[in-house]
Amino acid sequence: MSSESIEQLAAARPRRADALRNYQKLIDAAREAFAEDGAETSLEEVARRAGVGIATLYRNFPERAALLEAVYLEEVETLCTSSADLVELPAWDAFAEWLRRLTAYLVNKQALAPVLLSTFDLDAQVFHRSRAALFAVGEPLLHRAQQEQAVRTDTDLAEVMKLAGGIAKIPASGAAEIDHILEMALDGLRYRPDNLQS
């Protein structure tokens, strides 16, 4: 699914195949390193894990913040583009699957969150861009489900995203417990005439 917000997330990628491979190696290595070692991870360690020289890292990411931003926005873009197939599903199935994917993304983001918040202000452009991209994908799915009376109409995507975020932060014993809590939340979002406010 394309939108201006999603396209902006990919704008900084290199075009040459070899440069793109190195860029992707650095993103993958940084994601793992920051999740394991936190904000103190050195850029030298990221380059080592990626199997490239430090000069290659700095050529792609002149500063730590640029690398962190790229890691975060790529995860958002992956979630958004992976949702393109959902438009073929019935309205409820499409919305429910998107919420499952959103929650899984937010669970995974918990490992990166401390590093992000130690680098960026909550009002930083990176967070505005990611939110805009998520809304560009999620709102049409929610609106279609509401119009087809599959999802209750007394909510909006901002509330749904808060719900997913809350579930993602629950200290759970494993993925099965998170899935069970999410299924209960989805049941509460289903359309029923008695749960609507006029």
Image (tube, grey):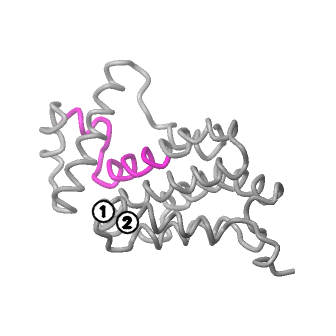
Q: Nearer the viewer, residue 34 or 198?
A: 198
Rendered view: 17 above or below 75: above
Q: Position of residue 76 (x, y in %)?
A: 48, 49
Q: Position of residue 60 (x, y in %)?
A: 32, 37
The quadrant in which residue 6 appears is: top right
Rendered view: 194 above or below 133: below
- Provide the residue designation for mark 2: 177
**Which stretch did the figure color magenta?**
55-76
Side of 136 relative to 114 (left or right): right
Q: Nearer the viewer, residue 163 or 43?
A: 163
**Label 1 packing within 10 angstroms: few (<14), some (14-19), many (20+):** few
What residue appears at the point 64 percent right and 37 percent down from the top-left corner? 1
Side of 65 relative to 87 (left or right): left
Q: Amino acid at mark 2?
A: Glu
The number of discs equals: 2
Disc sitting over residue 133 in the figure: none
The local secondary structure at tag 1 comes to loop
The quadrant in which residue 189 appears is: bottom right
What residue appears at the point 30 percent right and 62 percent down from the top-left corner? 174
The quadrant of the image that shows the C terminus is bottom right
Rendered view: 31 above or below 172: above
Asked if labels 2 and 1 touch by Cβ distance under 8 angstroms, the answer is yes
Q: Residue furthest right?
A: 198
**134 within the magenta span:** no
What residue appears at the point 43 percent right and 55 percent down from the top-left corner? 104
Disc sitting over residue 174 in the figure: 1
What residue appears at the point 73 percent right and 51 percent down from the top-left corner? 140
The local secondary structure at tag 2 comes to helix
Q: Position of residue 56 (x, y in %)?
A: 23, 32
Side of 55 relative to 180 (left or right): left
Q: Residue furthest bottom?
A: 197
